[in-house]
Amino acid sequence: MTDPTPHLIRTSRDGDVLILTIDNPPVNAFSPGVPEGLKAGLDAAATDDTVRAVVIIGGGRTFIAGADIRTFNLPREQAPDLRGTIAKLDAFPKPTVAALHGTALGGGFELALGCTYRVATPDAKVGLPEVKLGLLPGAGGTQRLPRVVGVKKALDLILSGTPVGAAPARDLGLIDEIVEGDLLTGAVAFAWRVADVRPLPRISERPAQPDPEAIEAARQSIRKTHRGQLSPQFIVDLVDLATRTPFNEGHAEEGVKFVQAKDSPQSRGMRHMFFAEREAAKIPGLDKTTPTTDIRRVGVIGAGTMGGGIAMNFLNAGIPVTIVETAQENLDRGLNTIRKTYEASAAKGRLKPEDVQKRLDLLTPTLSMNDLGDADLIIEAVFEDMAVKKDIFTRLDAVAKPGAILATNTSTLDVGEIAAVTSRPEQVIGLHFFSPANIMKLLEIVRADRTSDSVLATSLKLSRTIGKVGVVVGVCNGFVGNRMLYAYREQASKAVLEGATPQAVDAAMNALGLPMGPYAMSDMAGLDIGYMARRAAAERAGQPMPDDWVDRVVQLGRKGQKTGAGVYDYPDGSRTPVPSPAVDDLIQAYRAEKGVQPREATQDDLIARLTATLANEGARILEEGIALRASDIDTIYTYGYGFPAYRGGPMHYASEQGLTTVVQTLERHGLEVAPLLRRLAQEGKTFAQYDAERAKSQT
C-alpha cells in the first residue's frame, strides 16, 4: 500500500495492522497536516481488506501533547479539524488502538478517547488541561469522559486540568492495557487480539449516569476555585448535559460552548499568559552556548521567614543548603519553622513522612559565615538596609570560593551598588523571591550593569530547577513588581482621599479577580513594612517622607493583622477584615485637613483607575528598559501579585480595554501619561504589538 498521507503522518504495516505514526516534533501538536494525514490513513485502511486494525502512535518522545494553541486564532476553515478527525475515528468500522507514551493531553487525549481502545507505557500521562487556558475540551471530552469514569470523577479531572498517570487511568477505565517493553510491539499485539471483536466498544455509545449531587457540588466549588471564570461554568453544564441527552446533541453543544470560551477575553488572557511565561526565558544575547555553573550547594544568610522559605526551595530540589544566622535563638526559631512547615505538608498528604527527614538532612545550620566556603551560590536574605547588605557582601567576598555566585534577595535596593563593594561584581545578581518564598512561583532575576551572562543564564536555569518562573529585570527602586505596586497603592490612597472607602477599593479589585485588594493585602503583610520602606526611600533621597493617611494609621500603632488592627479591625484574633470606625474617623479628618470634598466613585471607576495606573507605570518601566517585554510585566504581576491570569496581566488587560481608553482614564484623574503608552494609543497599537516589533528589531 502506498503512503497516502501528508508528511506529518508516516504509515507502515505489521501484518494486517496499519500503523499511523504522528511525526510532528517536538510534541506532535495537533497542527495543520496532522488531521489530514490521519484521515487519509483511515480512508486507505477502510478500503483495504487486508487491514484488520489500525494503531495510532506518536513518533519521538510523546503522543499528541495537545492542540497547537497558535492555531486558535485562525479562521475556522483554516484551523485543524480535530472534531472531524475524531468523528471519523468514532465511526470507523475497524478497531483503532491509540498507543500512548509521554503525554496525551487536551486534544491528544480526546483523539485517544475517540479510538476504540487505548494502551500506554507505564510512565504515560493523560489529561484534559484546557481549563487552564480558559477553554474546555471541545472535541468530545466533556461528553466521553463522564461515560467512562462517571460525573464526579470527570468533573474532578476536567476542572483541575491535572494529568493522571497510566496506572490510575487504567483503574478508571481510560486505558485498556499498560504495555511493558516496546510500546509499538505491545500495541500491535493488542490490536491483533481485538481485531475481530464486534460490536466495537465505542465510548460515545455508552450511557452517562446522572449525578445531581456531584453537579451541584461542582457548581459550589468553582465559585471559590475558579471565581469569575467562564469556562468552568460551561464545563459543569456540559458534563451535566452528557447525562441527559444523546451523545450527538451534547457533542454539538460542546462545540458551540468551546467557540464561546475560545473567543472570550478570559481565554485570550490565559493564552497570552501561557506564551508570556515561556517568552520570559528568552533573553537577547543568551543561548544554549552560554556557559552556566552547576549549583551543587547553596548558602542562605538569614533564617527568618524569607531566608527559611528560600532555603526550602533548594531542599525540595535535593540541593544541600547551609543556612547562617547571627544568634542561636534566631537559628533555632528558623529551623523549627522549616520543620513545622514540612510536617504540616506531610500531615496533609503532600509529602511522605520519610521525605520530611530527607529534606531536613540536607540542611546545615551555622552561626559562622566562614562555613559558606564550599557554596556555589550564596543568597543574602536580611532586612532592607543598604549598609547591612554592603557589610554582608564585603564579608562574603572574602569567604566565598572563586566563581561562587553572590545573590541578594533585596526587593528595592540597587544591586549594582551592593555588587560594587565586592571584587567580583560580575558574579553578583539579585534573586528577589516573593513571600512565602517556598510557595510563590515568581522569581525576579535582577541583572546589574556588570552581572555576567553566565551568572544570568545560571540563575534562569536554576529558577526552573526549583520550580520558579524566573523573569529578568533591570535595576531601579522596586524593580518591576514593587515599583508598580507603589504606584498602584498611591492611587488607591488618593481614591480614598477623594471619597472612596478602603473596603470599596478592595471590593473593586476583588471584582476584577484579585484575591485581595490593596488594603487587605497591606494589613496581611504588615502596614509597618511599607511605612518603613517609604521612610527609608525618602531618607535615601534626602527628602521628607510624603504625608499619607495610611501612614497615620501606622502611627496609631495599627500595623495590620499582627496587631489586630490596621486599615481594618481584626477582632478576637480573626483574620477576617472588619471596617474600622476609628480609621473611618481618621480618613474623614484627613480629608477635612486637606480641604477635600468627598465624591462617590463607582466600582467600574475604581477598577479603571487602578488598572490604568499599573499599565502606565509598566509603560515607563518598558521605556526605561527595566523590563524586556510587556509580557514579562504581565508574568511578574500575575505570578507575584495575584493579578488574575484570565485577565492576562495588567499590560494585556490595558490593551483589551483599548489604550486610548486607558489614556483617557489617566487624564481624567490628573495623571501624567507615559510617553510610550500615549504613542501606542495614538497609533492604535497594543502592548503585544510593541513586543512583537521589538523582538523583530532584535533579530
Image (tube, rainbow, N blue to C red):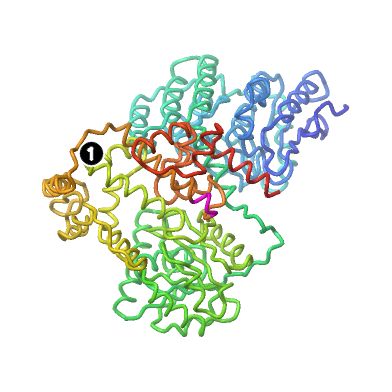
Residue 89 drawn at (x, y percent)? 67, 23
Q: Which residues are magenta?
A: 621-625
Is 301 placed left or right of 589 in the picture? Answer: right
Q: Name the residue carrying label 1.
A: 500
Q: Residue at x 46, y 44 (%)?
A: 674
Q: Is residue 170 visible?
A: no
Q: Residue 436 placed where, x, y %? A: 37, 58
Can residue 182 be seen in this snapshot? yes
Residue drawn at 53 percent across, 81 percent down: 400
Eyeballing the image, is 143 above or below 582? above
Task: Name the outermost residue toward the right.
Answer: 2
Callout 1: 10 Å neighbours few (<14), some, many (20+)? many
Residue appearing at x 35%, y 64% in the figure: 537
Q: Nearer the viewer, residue 381 or 440?
A: 381
Taking the magenta stretch, the answer to whether it contains residue 624 is: yes
Image quarter (top left, top right, bottom left or bottom right) of the N terminus:
top right
The residue at the point 53 percent across, 29 percent down is: 137
Q: Is residue 269 magenta?
A: no
- Pick whichever, 60 or 492, lies toward us: 492
Dominant secondary-structure state across the stretch colored magenta: helix
Q: Position of residue 203 (x, y in %)?
A: 57, 24
Dot 1 lies on which element?
Answer: loop
- In the image shown, does 109 or 8 lie closer to the viewer? 8
> Viewer-proximal residue, 316 or 474?
474
Is residue 514 found left or right of 48 in the rendered image? left
